Image (spheres, helix red, strand yellow):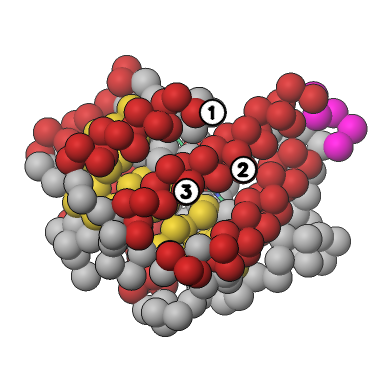
């Protein structure tokens, strides 16, 4: 409970914004990132009433932007305890329809973005308490579930989350020597701009499940892929 220093990418709306809200309520300090002030009204409004929310401009597709965001955080904070790689994009086009440009952009944001943010935040995380990187993944990225369920048809997104999961696994091993743990979490199907109106969970509900899962996570857990329901998801 409370008092952690937490970086959340893509805090302008959806799951990222609600993570910021609930983590602030618990008394944590949150570095919430946004790309565009005009389309981040709810985040800016939240910051008016929350002095523990610091807004940081960040486009995870830009190395320069990531460097400058990390510099901004370093100027304000000696350490980070958690990083949520939450920023993500989706294209529902199937294997037959997907464009090369969209495929590349999805990898850039969902995989390379998370890679660069994690690498950039590593020095701050090493000075944190029980430092943890949480990669927002998806059951759509599970190779093991492919063919087992109806899910499918968003090829670039699926590939990107499978790649993100490999990043989770490999960095959980490579960051062991720094004491930094890395996990993949699927938030479930959530009513955001991405998830749509048909989704299972209201945003606060999914975020509450994620935070209680993190609260109860054994302190040695790393390199795992879990759902909002606490169940392990096959890679
Ligand atoms: N919703 C679901 O059902 C669901 C299911 C499984 C996994 N997830 C994962 O959960 C995460 C959050 O999803 P969501 O449903 O909250 O999505 P969302 O409502 O579409 O919000 C996406 C967030 O990511 C940010 N973002 C996108 N590209 C970015 C970039 N290049 N640099 C920085 N920020 C960027 C957006 O910022 P802007 O406002 O500037 O665009 C926005 O804040 C994603 O990783 C998603 O894949 C969601």
Q: Residue at x 36, y 64 (%)?
A: 131
The answer to whether residue 97 is magenta is: yes
Q: Residues within 10 Å of mark 2 (few under 14, many from 20)?
A: many
Distance from Cα at disc 2 to Cα at disc 1: 10 Å
Q: Is mark 1 within 8 Å of ligand 1?
A: yes
Q: Earlier in the sequence, mark 1 or mark 3?
A: 1
Give the percent coordinates (x, y) of residue 187.
51, 58
Residue at the spot of label 2: 111
Circle 1 sits in a helix, a strand or a loop, which is it?
Answer: loop
- 2 or 3: tag closer to the N-terminus: 2
Label 3 neighbour load within 10 Å: few <14, some 14-19, many 20+: many
Closer to the camera, 184 or 147? 184
- Which quadrant is the C terminus positioned in? bottom right
* Residue 118: image tag: 3
Part of the protein shown in magenta: 95-99
Judge depth for marks 2 and 3 and give the one in front. 3
């Amino acid at each position: 409970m409370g008092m952690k220093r937490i970086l959340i990418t893509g805090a302008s709306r959806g799951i990222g914004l609600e993570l910021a809200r609930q983590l602030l309520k618990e008394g944590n300090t949150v570095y919430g990132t946004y790309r565009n002030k005009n389309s981040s009204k709810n985040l800016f409004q939240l910051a008016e009433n929350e002095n523990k929310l610091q807004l940081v401009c960040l486009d995870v597709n830009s190395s320069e932007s990531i460097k400058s965001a990390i510099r901004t955080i370093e100027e304000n904070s000696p350490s980070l305890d958690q990083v949520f790689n939450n920023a993500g994009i989706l294209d529902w086009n199937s294997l037959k329809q997907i464009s090369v440009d969209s495929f590349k952009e999805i990898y850039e944001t969902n995989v390379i973005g998370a890679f660069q943010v994690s690498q950039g935040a590593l020095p701050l995380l090493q000075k944190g308490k029980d430092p943890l990187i949480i990669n927002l993944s998806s059951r759509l990225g599970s190779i093991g579930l492919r063919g087992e369920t109806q899910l499918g048809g968003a090829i670039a997104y699926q590939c990107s989350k499978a790649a993100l999961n490999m990043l989770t696994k490999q960095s959980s091993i490579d960051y062991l020597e720094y004491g930094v743990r890395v996990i993949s979490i699927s938030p479930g199907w959530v009513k955001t701009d991405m998830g749509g109106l048909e989704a299972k969970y209201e945003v606060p509900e999914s975020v509450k499940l994620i935070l209680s899962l993190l609260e109860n996570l054994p302190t040695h857990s790393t390199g795992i892929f879990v759902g909002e329901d606490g169940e392990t998801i096959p890679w």
